[in-house]
């Protein structure tokens, strides 16, 4: 994902939801045209759980829902914080006392879970990313696990 806003806007990821909402999803935006001139969109609705055509790292404003951009940025930060947790940090945090790097990583995983549970549009964004070939398989499995946990946690008594 790219950041073409002012430099001070790019310093913290993820940004507040209002920042993402400045570019709402517009289903009329054509993502690209193929060699035959056929128009393609990444999706038809923010509720789509799979891409009609997978986006690259750059895309036209409005062609991706703001919820997905927020999830992508949060996932990027989560991976960065996870990579800071060493083998020693992990085991120390399990049996003695959580280290700062482990706590930061855990905080971002909790943010991902909270995003997934926020609205159906966020859940759909998780589903799209978990089906995306551009996301490494291990992360796709983690995203599917988060969706499964949110689905179990969001069931109402009448859903049983």
Image (cartoon, grey):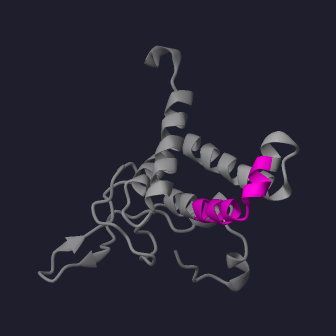
Tell me the magenta residue range: 73-91
- Residue 78 x, y percent position in the rendering: 65, 59
Asked if the magenta segment contains residue 160, the reply would be no
Q: Name the residue rendered at 72%, 71% in the picture.
A: 12
Q: Is residue 90 magenta?
A: yes
Task: Name which residue lies at 46% across and 61% down.
Answer: 65
Residue 119 shows up from this direction: no
Residue at the far left in the pictured view: 36
On the question of residue 133 being in view, the answer is yes
Image height check: is 12 above or below 48?
A: below
Q: Measuring 50% from the left and 56% from the top, which residue is drawn there? A: 139
In the picture, measured across the screen, residue 31 lies left or right of residue 124, that is left
- For the image, the number of numbered tags is 0
Q: Residue 102, image x and y in percent?
A: 77, 53
Comparing 54 with 102, the one in front is: 102
Tell me which corner region of the image, top left, top right, bottom left or bottom right, holds residue 51. Answer: bottom left
Instruction: Decide: is 67 above or below 123.
Output: below
Residue 40 versus residue 103 in the image, above or below: below
Q: Main secondary structure of the magenta part?
A: helix
């Amino acid at each position: 994902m790219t950041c073409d806003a002012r430099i001070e806007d790019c310093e913290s990821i993820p940004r507040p939801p209002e920042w993402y909402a400045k570019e709402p999803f517009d289903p009329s935006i054509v993502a690209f045209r193929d060699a035959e001139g056929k128009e393609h969109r990444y999706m038809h609705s923010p509720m789509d759980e799979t891409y009609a055509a997978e986006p690259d790292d750059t895309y036209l404003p409005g062609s991706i829902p703001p919820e997905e951009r927020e999830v992508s940025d949060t996932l990027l930060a989560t991976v960065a914080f996870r990579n800071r947790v060493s083998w020693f940090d992990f085991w120390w945090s399990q049996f003695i006392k959580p280290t700062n790097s482990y706590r930061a990583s855990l905080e971002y995983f909790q943010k991902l879970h909270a995003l997934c549970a926020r609205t159906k549009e966020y859940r759909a964004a998780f589903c799209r990313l978990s089906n995306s070939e551009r996301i490494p398989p291990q992360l796709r499995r983690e995203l599917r696990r988060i969706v499964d946990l949110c689905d179990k946690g969001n069931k109402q008594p009448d859903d049983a």
